[in-house]
Amino acid sequence: IEYSSQGGKKDGMQALPTPVEIAQFFQSQNQQAPPYLYANYKSEAKMNYLMIPILAKFGWNLGHQNHWRIYVDAGPFAGFLLSAHQVESGGQSTLYLDANGTQPIVNPQTEQPIQGNFDTTTNIKSDLHHFNFGLEGNAGIACKINKKNTIFLEGGANYGFLNIQKGTANGKNNTGAGTVTLGYAYCLGKK
């Protein structure tokens, strides 16, 4: 069983669904509100999964005393979403009609660009699928300290096959992660 923290970051000009108050502003101007606006801010998705891999492991002893062993493992995994949050930061940013940031939305009464607030954390778990499956693989080296104790260092990766979003309005994304593990193993059986 594994715990995996995954996600992604964006920094700079990016799309956002038109907020209700901005849609109302467009309606008060007898205009149709666009489905998306653009702003310059930082956005980070943080998702935590409980993963259950089923891995086939192959290894080779180094030398004739068998203290060192290299190995590889690979196989499928099932992932269960535990939590998911969207963290936005960047303070106030001008809202634009275009992705290039050349058409700011201007309030005709003040003749000032309309600003959006980008210091929020939103729970997005309900927008994501709660189950995923994919492949995982690792390669590592282990050192047997004695008959029952081993330390190991491994690197690997996993990739989920399902799109994580329930809808396509915010894109189609898959999960994936690179991993580095430093560990200790203890044999419970007789050796």
Image: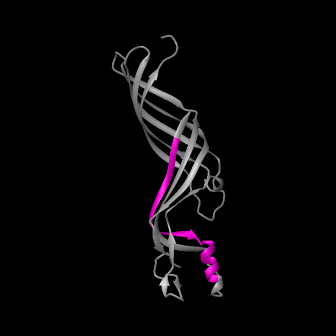
> Residue 145 placed where, x, y %?
37, 18
Camera-side residue: 135 or 97? 97
Quarter in which the N terminus is drawn: top right
Question: Would residue 88 be counted in the magenta stretch?
Answer: no
Question: Would you say residue 38 is visible in this rendering?
Answer: yes
Say if 93 sits above or below 104 in the image: above
Question: Would residue 10 be counted in the magenta stretch?
Answer: yes
Q: Main secondary structure of the magenta part?
A: strand
- The residue positioned 59% from the left and 59% from the top of the image is 172
Camera-side residue: 169 or 68? 169
- The residue positioned 51% from the left and 16% from the top of the image is 188
Q: Tell me where the magenta segment starts and ends, as one range.
A: 4-26
Say if 188 sits above or below 118 in the image: above
> Residue 43 placed where, x, y %?
49, 61
Q: Residue lying furthest top in this view?
A: 190
Q: Would residue 33 be found to the left or right of residue 56 on screen?
A: right
- The residue positioned 62% from the left and 56% from the top of the image is 165
